[in-house]
Image (cartoon, rainbow, N blue to C red):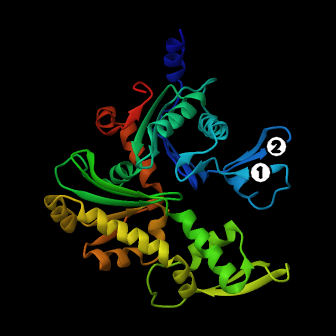
Amino acid sequence: MRGVLNILFGRFSNDLGIDLGTANTLVYVKDKGILINEPSVVAVNNRTDQILAVGTEAYKMVGRTPSYIVATKPLVDGVISDFEVTEKMLKYFIRKVHKETFAFTPRPRIVIGIPLEVTEVERKAVIDAALSAGAREVYLIEQPMASAIGARLPVQESSGHMVVDIGGGTTDIAVVSLGGIVTSKSLKIAGNEFNEDIIKYARDYFNVLLGERTSENVKIKIGSADILPEPLVMKVRGRDLVTGLPKEIIMDDAQVREALSRSVRTIVDSVKSTIENTPPELVSDIYENGLLLTGGGALLRNLDHLISDATGVPVLAAEDPLTCVVRGTAVLIDDLAFLKNVVVQDSGIM
């Protein structure tokens, strides 16, 4: 009976592609495009267990809440750390995109991008959260594969392509060929780690404590991986660790580059080691086709130049790298035969 109801409700539901990221969640709705691009943040009132805000509104509360309100990120390193909050966040997004439809109880088919090297238990947690949030079918695809598909790479051909997807919680490096991942490596170093690097640098060199949102702003506005043709400077405000009072400092791109250097170098070294472990024929293809940078980290200035200099391989940042994963899920929603070939797990084979 439940299956019949799911099919019935599914006829009035929109199929969804979701990039369930540590920093941001993007939702593609079939035939309508990307309708949601919001931070993966949920504000919870601990006194009443009530969800106060989700997404952009919750992000505005980060670092500004009283003790009984917590603006939390339910995903850590691309993995669910709080099942109930993740379920409520997904339910909120599902209802939001069905607001203008006649679906009283939406039961969409959902394709979700997940990081490389997640365990069976972690995959099952994603599927269970999506089913509890209202999905009738859930399919999981690895994010670098989704990124490659979203960037319109011919992943089903025998030619090799290399993708480096730098998200909020993880950096996934993969060589794809014939619809599968041949060689891969996953790091817990990505956008959020960059933010922490900047906070640590300001604390150590300026005795100033920066907030998370401030450090991210610094990364976006003056962050770089290699020397820039013209210096960038930014005024930054935080709390003086000596006096406890507000203090304004001036940071330049060289200082931010120094702060990020260790994390950036780790990513570059991991790209090199992945190439070293790739079959020679595919290495030849990578040299010819180049390496594709996707995810928010691809926007770090001159990262493409640094990786290219270190590996000798042409490097190109994807067009609109932030949306590559969700655009890949969009392609798969429209081509179920393709989806069946690249899916790593679904709600029917748990």
Question: In x, y percent, where is residue 288?
Answer: 18, 67
* Residue at 66% from the left image edge and 36% from the top image edge: 84
* Residue at 25% from the left image edge and 58% from the top image edge: 161
Name the residue type under label 1: Val
Label 2 belongs to which residue?
A: 46
* Residues tagged 2 and 1 counted as in contact (Cβ below 8 A): yes
Displayed quadrant of residue 334: top left
Disc 2 is placed on an element classified as: loop
Q: Is residue 217 left or right of residue 187?
A: right
CA neighbours of label 1 inside 10 A, class few (<14), some (14 to 19), many (20+): many
Q: Nearer the viewer, residue 169 or 18?
A: 169
The answer to whether any part of residue 134 appears in the image is: no
How many labels sit on residues? 2
Question: In x, y percent, where is residue 252?
Answer: 59, 87
Name the residue type under label 2: Asn
Label 1 belongs to which residue?
A: 70
Instruction: Tell which residue pokes out farthest to the top in this image.
Output: 1
Displayed quadrant of residue 309: bottom left
In this picture, is 138 found above or below 323? above
Instruction: Find residue 5 and name its label.
Output: none
In this picture, is 101 found above or below 332? above
Q: CA distance from mark 2 to mark 1?
A: 7 Å
Question: In x, y percent, where is residue 54?
Answer: 69, 46
* Residue at 58% from the left image edge and 56% from the top image edge: 23
Disc 1 is placed on an element classified as: strand
Q: Nearer the viewer, residue 334 or 65?
A: 65
- Which of the two labelled residues, at mark 2 and mark 1, occupies the earlier sequence position? 2
